[in-house]
């Protein structure tokens, strides 16, 4: 998380707003599964700063947990999506929606890792 947090502000330029909304619908942050992450304070500040941009991009308020989820979503897109979908145990409809949402927008900006 620490190495991706600084780029959280740029995520809206890589995805359609509907894709980010769809991710949050499929994998909500208000569920009954808790995750504990230890991150650096600078990463926490970067994620907090991204709340405004992501909220504006999506058109509705997002929480800190939603920003973390979206950053992890961006990571998953860059990794083997099929393997992750199988591990998430998504039903066929949600798996198809996840794959559709996981496509990056066409852009002339090349993201750096």
Image (spheres, rainbow, N blue to C red):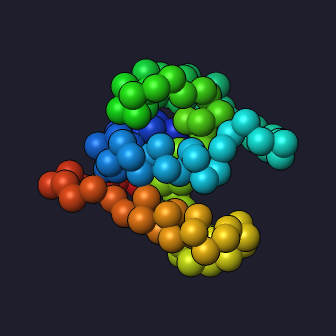
Question: Image quarter for residue 107?
Answer: bottom left
Q: Position of residue 7 (x, y in %)?
A: 42, 40
- Residue 3 at x, y percent in the picture: 53, 46
Residue 4, can we see it?
no
The correct choice, above or below, for 84 with respect to 111 in the image is below
Q: What quarter of the picture does the C terminus occupy?
A: bottom left
Q: Residue furthest front?
A: 93
Please state if 43 lies on the left or on the right of 51 as rendered: right
| Whether residue 3 is situated above or below residue 8 in the rendered picture | below
The structure residue drawn at horizontal position 56% and vertical position 78%, both measured from the top left corner, is 82
What count of labels does the image hold?
0
Instruction: List x then y, in percent, for residue 47.
Output: 54, 30
* Relative depth, front residue between 68 and 86: 86
Identify which residue, 70 or 79, lies in the foreground: 70
Tell me: 28 left or right of 42: right
Query: Residue 12 at x, y = what percent?
Result: 35, 40
Name which residue lies at 67% across and 70% down: 91
Location of residue 45 (image quadrant):
top right
Nearer to the camera, 14 or 92 = 92
Tell me the residue at 36%/42% (across/down).
17
Q: Is residue 26 visible?
A: yes
Q: Is residue 46 left or right of residue 26?
A: left
Residue at 73% x, 70% y: name it: 89
In the image, is residue 92 above or below residue 54?
A: below
């Amino acid at each position: 998380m620490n190495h991706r947090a600084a780029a959280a502000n740029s995520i809206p330029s890589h995805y359609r707003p509907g894709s980010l909304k769809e991710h949050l619908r499929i994998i909500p942050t208000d569920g009954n599964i808790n995750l504990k992450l230890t991150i650096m304070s600078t990463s926490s500040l970067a994620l907090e700063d991204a709340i405004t941009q992501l909220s504006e991009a999506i058109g509705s308020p997002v929480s800190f947990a939603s920003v973390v989820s979206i950053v992890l979503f961006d990571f998953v897109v860059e990794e083997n999506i099929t393997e992750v979908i199988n591990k998430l145990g998504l039903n066929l409809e949600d798996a198809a929606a996840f794959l559709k949402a996981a496509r990056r927008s066409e852009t002339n900006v090349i993201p750096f890792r």
